[in-house]
Amino acid sequence: MGRNKKFTVRRVLRNIRRGLLFYCQNCSIHGLKYIAEPDRHWAERLFWIIVCLFSIYSTRNLVISNWRAFQSNAVSFVSDTSYLTWDTDFVTVSVCEAESLDKIDMEGQRLFGETRNTYLDGLISSLAFFDGNCRTCISQCSTGELNCSIIDIETIVKEVRTPCEKLMGNCFWSGTEFECCDEFLPLQTELGTCFTINSIHTNRPKGTKLKMTSNRTKGPGKLTFEVSEAANIFLHGRDDVPFINHPQEAKVSIDWGSVLRISFQVKEIVNDPILDQVSIEQRRCRMEHENNLEVYKFYSFSTCVVNCRAYAQRDLCNCTQHFMPPLRGVATCDIHGLECLTKNSVILLGLKSENYSKEGLECHCMPSCSESEITMVSTSITLNSDVQDESAFGSKLLLKWRLCRPRDINVT
């Protein structure tokens, strides 16, 4: 029986050898047939064995290298220059009222009378236009020079900040007038309530949304409107929000009685549908619907930073500032809480990369997969010679596309 088993093993091995020889003699892989042909010299066979083994080794290394590249850098950018065939969305524009010394003085008189302690004006400014620091809270409230316990922060903000109906007027999109506050909708930001057009973060009550697109038929779009107070104007993508660390090149401040003209370019990023099948870690960006934040419903780099700062405020001071979109179960800061935020402002207001020595927040925020590149081509501010009544909309703003640039497409 052992002899039969040995014979069977030999027959199997012989069949395997015969099969390998047949494969090598008839396959299309270069070099293998020279190893299997019986009339080849042993030196020639050895040469081709070495060549084939080296080829297999090199192919293996190439496959592994490509696999690792796919794991770490799966996304590439391709420029789409066929811009005659597609629509380009207008940028999102946010209007945030800015601090004005004249307004602070007027509101101080109205709220506390002409004989008020003038330090109250500083407190009004710090609360109504909180930028991460409440210096009056430190210098006057904590020392007892002002009785800040009677101050209701929500009331101060409500009395001082201007509602949309009084802040904005005379809005036009490419020459067609529209109702400002039907399109510039309130958006809660860490800078206070801003009025934003063309954003995915605002909730439109009803009616048809204004289509702010440009193409070769419509030409470059133009948005004009007027404001009645000093304001900060932010340009950003539809999934972004104004925030403390907003890029300075996409932000302009305008005083009352001025005319602001902005020409800009937009470079869009459009995602290939297959990109959804690539993991977040591989593509190293998040789609707007891949949201892991508390403070906003849609993801972007700016909303991630705001969420990170809200967590840091909670961890350092056990509350978040009164403009911050709320965190579940976390209180809104009172005057003492704002004192704490001010003392930690160096940490809370700055951003830093990992293992960097300077103070700041380390947020680990991925970019958005659809982040737009906005470039201001020109910005000019001149005096508004047409304004006569100080109660009127004293400032004019004109935002215009200079030209449409090719867009990038994320592909795998």
Image (spheres, rainbow, N blue to C red):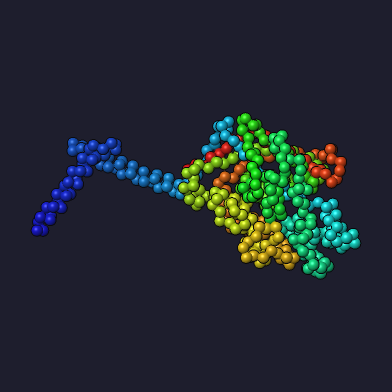
Residue at x-position 85% and y-position 54%:
106
Q: Is residue 58 above or below residue 360?
A: above
Indicate whether 155 appears above or below 200: below
Q: Position of residue 20 (x, y in %)?
A: 22, 43
Percent coordinates x, y for residue 384 in the rendering: 82, 39
Q: Which residue is pictured at 84% across the width and 38% down the height? A: 385
Residue 262 appears in which quarter of the rendering? top right
Q: Among all residues in the image, which is located at the extreme bottom? A: 144
**Residue 345 as seen in the image, left or right of residue 369:** right
Nearer to me, 188 or 43: 188
Q: Is residue 174 visible from the viewing direction of this image?
A: yes
Residue 315 appears left or right of 101:
left
Report x, y in % for residue 95. Answer: 72, 47
User: In x, y percent, where is residue 123?
Assistant: 80, 61
On screen, residue 233 versus residue 107, left or right, reads left
Closer to the camera, 55 or 392?
392
Give the total of numbered labels.
Answer: 0
Q: Is residue 362 visible?
A: no
Left or right: 405, with 248 as reference point: left
Quadrant location of the N terminus in the rendered image:
bottom left
Q: Residue at x 66, y 57 (%)?
A: 325
Residue at x 71% of width, y 53% of height: 193
